[in-house]
Amino acid sequence: MQYHEYQPKGLLGEYVQTIWAIESENEEETYPRSLIMPDGIVEIIFHYADPFLYYKDNKRMLLAENAAVSMMTKHIQIESSARIGFIAVRFFPWGAYHFFDIPISTFLDDTINGERLWANSSKKIIADLKSADNREKRYELVEEFLLTKLKEHKKSETKTDEAVKLIRHSKGNLSIEDVCDKTGLNKKQLERKFVKLVGATPKIFSRICRFLHICRHLDEQKGKSLTQLAYECGYYDQSHFINEFKAFSGFTPKDFFEKEHIWFTHV
């Protein structure tokens, strides 16, 4: 299986973390069923081969050829359905809402067909990707598509963008009061804008950032007790840490880190 990442430059680099691609090297190659943990971002998928399957609440569904996957507050599972070939755009938490107008809150913990976001433009980009004969051309097509949509949908939301960045950079440990003080937004304004543009409340986004930080750095904390880890990562106590972990992952910390095929998104 071929995996490749591309870092967009210029204007797109302000909103997009990375553009990445996976492609089968033969017809028998499959992508194993894997856990995708909660995140604070939206990801756009452009399939030019067979769409992936995803599992949510024990239901098995097929992704649209062009789909947006909202930020999640609980894990999902994915696997390939047949031949693999797609390009994915992973936005920064403040990035995605500048590329379409439908509120992210309307598809929180879910996916949405690209045709609902961009109408016939969604069909055209998929057709163009299918007819392209190499990865570089596909990256170029996706970048052109994104730049066009940014020009059409970019919003003047500098305070909201700043609030998201503050919470992200603090790993979820900056209080909502401090975010309001630093941005000049009151609590009601901050929550309203977050729900519409990011998809969830500032409090939930903070909790996700804290959860993902400890998951990614657990190997660096070997030898520390759960109580020590909990306090260092901003939890009230060990019980609070375990409850939060189960809420987002569905597992206790011990059970979770014994599992395989688990993937985290970098918020």
Image (cartoon, helix red, strand yellow):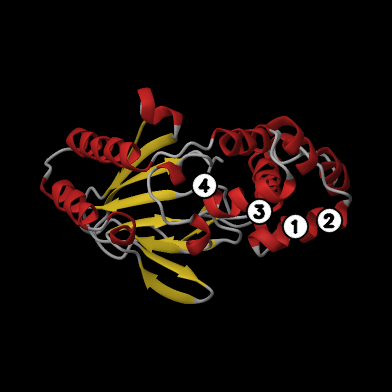
Query: Distance of mark 3 from mark 1, alpha carbons?
Result: 16 Å
Is disc 4 placed on a helix, strand or loop? loop
Position of residue 131 measured from the top left corner of the image (x, y, whole percent): 10, 48
- Identified at 49% across, 55% down, the residue is 104
The amino acid at mark 4 is Ile
121 with respect to 185 (left or right): left
The amino acid at mark 1 is Glu
Give the residue at mark 1. Answer: 244
Classify mark 3: residues with Cα within 10 Å, few (<14), some (14-19) or many (20+): some
52 with respect to 130 (left or right): right
Give the residue at mark 2. Answer: 240
Is disc 2 placed on a helix, strand or loop? helix
Q: Earlier in the sequence, mark 3 or mark 2?
A: 3
> Does the residue at mark 4 contact the one at mark 3 (Cβ under 8 Å)?
no
Count of picture labels: 4
Position of residue 59 measured from the top left corner of the image (x, y, whole percent): 46, 77
Q: Earlier in the sequence, mark 3 or mark 1?
A: 3
Residue positioned most to the bottom: 59
Give the residue at mark 3. Answer: 201
Query: Distance of mark 4 from mark 3, alpha carbons?
Result: 13 Å
Give the residue at mark 4. Answer: 41
Query: Distance of mark 4 from mark 1, alpha carbons?
Result: 19 Å
The amino acid at mark 3 is Thr
Up the image or down, 182 lies above or below 164; here it is above
> Does the residue at mark 4 contact the one at mark 1 (Cβ under 8 Å)?
no
Up the image or down, 179 lies above or below 45; here it is above
The amino acid at mark 2 is His
- Identified at 34% across, 51% down, the residue is 45
Question: In the figure, residue 159 lies in which quadrant?
Answer: top right
